Each structure stands twice: as C-alpha cells, then as structure tokens.
Amino acid sequence: MAEFAIKGWCPGALRPMESGDGWVVRIRPRLAELTAAQAFGLAAAALAYGNGVIELTARANVQLRGVTMQSHPPLIAALDDLGLVDPDAQAESQRNVVISPFWQGDETASLAADLGQALRHGPDLPSKFGYGIDLGPQRVLAGNSCDIRLERGAAGGLILRAEGSAGGQAVTMDTAVPEAMRMAAWFAASGGVTQGRGRMAAHAKGDMPFDTSQTPAALAPIAAPGITPQGALVGFEFGSLRAEVLADLANLAPTLRITPWRMVLLVGGALPTHPALITDADDPRLRVVACAGAPACPQACQDTRTLARRLAPCVPQGKLLHVSGCGKGCAHPSPADLTLSATPHGFAFLPKARAGGLGRVMQPQDITFETLGKAL
C-alpha cells in the first residue's frame, strides 16, 4: 500500500493547504449560507485568485482550488469584504459546526451564534472535532461527522448527544451551549485527545458524566435533489462546480445554503434546468464518491474521477461506490459498499470497507461493469 501523509487538520481560508493544483482555501459560511451577493463575489474571487474550481465539502464548507502564494492575500481581502473570513486562523478552525440546511425560524440561528461565540473560548480540541445542530422533527445529519450533537429527541425536546452514544440528555435553549462546552471540556480532560487527534465516537463508549436516557428523534429520509419545503435542492458531479455555475445559481435564489451532502439548497427557488446540475434523485452520479485524485492531489496515486464517471452507470440503486486516490479516503472516511483504493499499481478492491485496506489490485482499464457488478 502506498504511503501517504495524514495532515490531521483541515484547510481554512487563513490557513490554506497545499495541493497538486495550488493551495486549497476552505471557507466556512455562517449558518452555511451565502447571500446572492456573497455567491457572486465568491465566484468572482475563485476566477480572479484561483483556477475557478469550487468544491463543496462534507462539512457544508466551500473550497477554492488553485490559489497561489501571490494570489492568497488579495483573495483574503476579497473574502473579508464579503464577510466570509474569521478574525484569525484559530477562530476559523474552532468554528467547526455543521447545520441542517432545512432550518426555519430563529432557534438554529440563535444556537449557532451562541455556539460560535463559546467556541472561541472553548477547550483546545483537534481541528477535525466538530459539532452538529439538527433541530428538525427528524434527524438529517445522522450520517455526517459530528462529535457533539444538538438535536431533537423522540419526544420533541432539545437534546445534547455525544457521537457514539445511543441517547442524550435533555437541554434547553439556555443550557444547550453551556452543556455542549462542558461535554467538550470533559472530552479533552478525560483523555480524548492523543497526539493532537481524537474523536468522540470512540471515547464515548466509556462512562460519561452526562445523562444518556433521551432517545433521539427518528431519521429523515436521505436527502436527494428535488423540491423541498424550503426550496430546490441541487447536486453536482463529485460535489465540484465551476465558479460560473455558482454565479448562475446566485441568479436563481436570494439565499444559497451549502449542505453537508455536497448539494446546494436554493432557498425559495424552483428546480432549475442547468447542464452542470444534478436535479434527478435517480442520477447514477449520486451513487459514486470520488476525491480530486491525481494530479490535483499530490498524494493521490491515480486519476479517480475518470474511472468513477465511467463506472457510475453500473452502480445499483441503494449502493455506494467510493473511488479514493490514496488510502486516506478524504472524500468518504466511512466504509462504502465498495471502495476502490488507489495504489501505485492500480486500485485495490475493498468491499464493505473504507480506503486504505488490502485487497485484489486491478488496473483502471481492467475494471469493467461486470467485475464491479460482482463486487457490489
């Protein structure tokens, strides 16, 4: 298996990460929202200071690719003018909050604002440690990475739940954020962080000084492109789009919400017709996940998206194929029905597994619909 470097941190706007096509600059819009004006400005900045490629992440963030050392300072100035930059890199890295895009009313906005303020003075935690706010009647963020969750309980009240725990404790709007911070402090103080890394799911298997008696609300159906009560949900091949497409979307709705499923919610908008959008829930490209791959990522051993694009039509409904450029599996850290994990010698076949394992290795050109069908 090829060697790769685990960074242990995520890029930001103020702390970009070097990649094969330049710096990756990650932007964390507040409430995961962009106004139309911000979307237009972000599209212009991606073209002026990057290579025009925009990616949507599993944390409902937006990444610009192709930024250089020279173009980074004017990019930050442009993002600051748009209200999309934190005061400093530490504040940026701490504001790691995933929010359900289907929120309505003031509860979510209020909790997100209070949590953002509290995180500036919270414990020092790994940069991948994150929070989720999921206040709808059914949980939509259950499949997303959140170490501490504020969500609805089965009885309709607000609960605080540690990832890895089956139940949570009842909280109120007044106590939710202080209790979340107490849980984060417990995680840090009780050995949850080792060599700068650590996640709640493994740590919460032990005894916790928190009530876990409250059952979470039922799961919502998996989000898919189409019309929702809040507007039109649209997807993109591999969660990647050109800056020009983002500008087009800004013409269609006053507010765009970035989702943790690499889709965009056009708040109040109708379902558009656009060649770069995925608007059909049965589109086979939704059943394939692929990272940028080689040469965009210097750690990738193979081109991923050409293979993923070719294989997408033979992935059955309800199945997921993950094509990973290396063993890290950045695009999909969890097991997939089939993971093709790149090595210098081809792709390892890993059924019901995550990237990085050992398996039969095949050359990309030898992976056919038939071989994939048998594996799935």
Image (cartoon, rainbow, N blue to C red):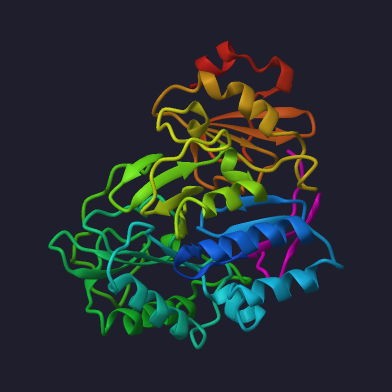
**Residue located at (41% from left, 39% from top):** 225
Picture coordinates of residue 177, whole percent (x, y): 34, 81
**Farthest residue in the front direction?**
251
Q: Is residue 6 visible?
A: no
Q: Nearer the viewer, residue 238 or 186?
A: 238
**Is residue 257 one of those drawn in magenta?**
no
Q: Residue at point 24% right, 53% down?
A: 138
> Which quarter of the figure has residue 291?
top right
Nearest the eye: 144 or 358 = 144
Tell me residue 227's x, y (percent): 34, 42
Q: Is residue 363 left or right of residue 126?
A: right
Q: Quadrant of residue 292?
A: top right
Relative to 201, 310 lies left or right: right
The image shows a total of numbered marks equal to 0
- 241 on left or right of 70: left
Q: Nearer the viewer, residue 140 or 84?
A: 84
> Residue lying farthest top?
370
Relative image position of residue 334 (x, y in whole percent): 50, 45
Residue 53 lies left or right of residue 160; in this view the side is: right
Quadrant location of the N terminus in the rendered image: top right
Question: Percent position (x, y) of residue 317?
Answer: 40, 25
Seen at 54% across and 48% down, the residue is 333
Residue 3 appears in the picture as rendered:
yes
Q: Is residue 366 above or below residue 51?
A: above
| Chain part drawn in magenta | 1-26
* 18 in magenta: yes
